[in-house]
Image (tube, rainbow, N blue to C red):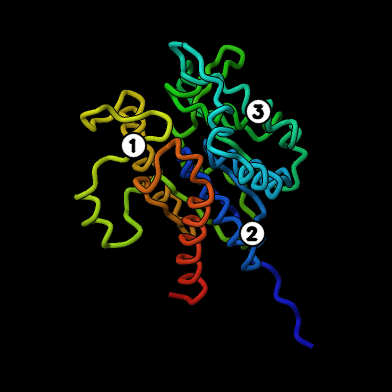
Amino acid sequence: MMRKRAPKKVALVLSSGGARGIAHIGIIEELEKRGYEIGSVAGTSMGAFVGGMYASGNFKKFKDWMFSLSRVDIFKLFDVTISINGLVKGERLFETLSKIIPDQNIEDMSIPYAAVSTDIINCKEVVFDRGSMYKAIRASISIPTFFRPLESGDSYLVDGGLLNPTPIDRVKRNKGDVLIAVNVESNTPDKPDEVKDKKKQKPKKNSFFPFRENDLPGYVELVNKTIGIMLNRISELNIEKYNPDLVIRLERGLYGTYDFHKYEEIVERGREAAVKVLDQFESGK
């Protein structure tokens, strides 16, 4: 009688990336389809969001909810405000989501989970591996100039990507697991032909923050692109330093930071990226 092969254990690291981080959903689905067992997860920004939904056991419910949203529904989740600290308060999103997926303490999750944020007052990285899941996610996704910082004690917490966009050093490791890092901030095109095509393309118009008439980036888009260059550089340095077993990349230029309404397309892009890397890994190449 043939014995069933034990699933491969995975320690999964999910990067920041705004709407591009929706690709993490497709990557996780592909891993599960192939029989991998995710034993721990750490993430920053959207990586912390998707990772938290997975670690809490609400991954499918979260995806179903996201796929039920229209473009107008998505826009309504952003409680826009006039503030020097950010354009969005960030309360409405979590109030809405908590009605479908209740908050829970990280230490009660089925697998170890960590979310990374940045304390801009004390200039240090903050890692959430205990306490409220939604507080951890809210702190980690606070993109500067877009979300208001999260006030916590004497600290103001913003996007963890400023210090650790791909938190390989924050994921819990188990003996014999496969360390997989996902970087959706990559500047490397998926296909060689895209290098030529990019020279001919004008900058993409952002879904929520349009470009100016002369096609130069507006203020928010300019800040995002500037931060994006930094995030990818830090991510690749982390990857070089910690040398994960597998790296799955998604090119930053494929989608805008706020292209959340393209969730179906982005999920499939993530799945395609995972298929390519896992096929090579499993074939021993």
Vertical position of residue 283 compared to residue 185: above or below: below
Give the amino acid at mark 3.
Phe
Asked if one can make out residue 104 in the rendered structure from this viewpoint, the answer is: no
Q: Nearer the viewer, mark 1 or mark 2?
A: 1
Q: Which residue is mark 2?
A: 175
Mark 1 and mark 2: Cα distance apart in space: 46 Å
Q: Name the residue rendered at 50%, 39% in the picture.
A: 260
Q: Name the residue rendered at 59%, 55% in the picture.
A: 28
Q: Which residue is mark 1?
A: 205
In primary-sequence order, the first of circles 2 and 3 is 3
In primary-sequence order, the first of circles 1 and 2 is 2
Asked if one can make out residue 221 in the rendered structure from this viewpoint, the answer is: yes
Q: Position of residue 201 (x, y in %)?
A: 24, 47
Bin the neighbour count of mark 1 within 10 Å (Cα to Cα): few under 14, some 14-19, many 20 and up.
some
Among the 4 quarters of the image, the one containing residue 33: bottom right
Q: Name the residue rendered at 62%, 32% in the picture.
A: 128
Mark 3 and mark 1: Cα distance apart in space: 27 Å
Give the amino acid at mark 2.
Lys
- Could you say whether the residue bearing mark 1 is in a helix, strand or loop? loop
Q: Nearer the viewer, residue 272 or 229?
A: 272
- Could you say whether the residue bearing mark 2 is in a helix, strand or loop? loop
Q: Which residue is mark 3?
A: 94
Q: Nearer the viewer, residue 146 or 166?
A: 146
